[in-house]
Amino acid sequence: MEILKVSSKSNPSKVAGAIANIFREKGSVEIQTIGAGSLNQAIKGIAIARGFVAPSGDNLVVIPAFNDVTINGEAKTAMKLIVTKK
């Protein structure tokens, strides 16, 4: 599964386009966020992407989970959002 990393500075419309494209191509997308700002942008992107794929009859489901990652030698907890079909 392809991992889409979203930051607090990510544009929700661009995130939505990436989600919709990967979703159409592979059927599911994994989004990784660290922090409240990036989670906010990811959720906005998912809501917008839902509008992009809904006309084709697809409905998005989000499965949240935690993921331990190492960034610059420092352990952090990331949110993993798995976006898939209902």
Image: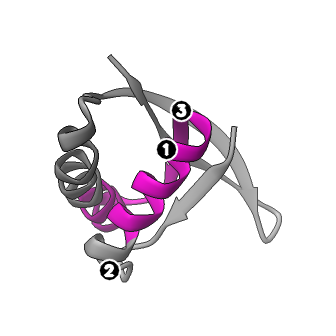
> Magenta segment range?
15-42
Element carrying mark 2: loop
| Residue count near mark 1 (Cα–Cα under 10 Å), binned few <14, some 14–19, many ≥20 | some
Mark 2 lies on residue: 11
**Which one is in front, 86 or 3?**
86
Q: Identify the residue under disc 3.
A: 27
Q: Nearer the viewer, residue 35 or 75?
A: 35
SS at mark 3 in the image? loop
Q: Position of residue 58 (x, y in %)?
A: 29, 30
Question: Which quarter shows the C terminus?
Answer: top left
Taking depth in this image into account, of 67 and 22 the one nearest to the observer is: 22
Hey, which residue is sitting farthest top in the picture? Answer: 86
Task: Specify whether 24 is left or right of 42.
Answer: right
What element does badge 1 sit on? helix
Which residue type does callout 3 highlight? Gly
Q: Cα distance, mark 1 to mark 3?
A: 6 Å
Residue at point 55%, 51% (across, down): 22
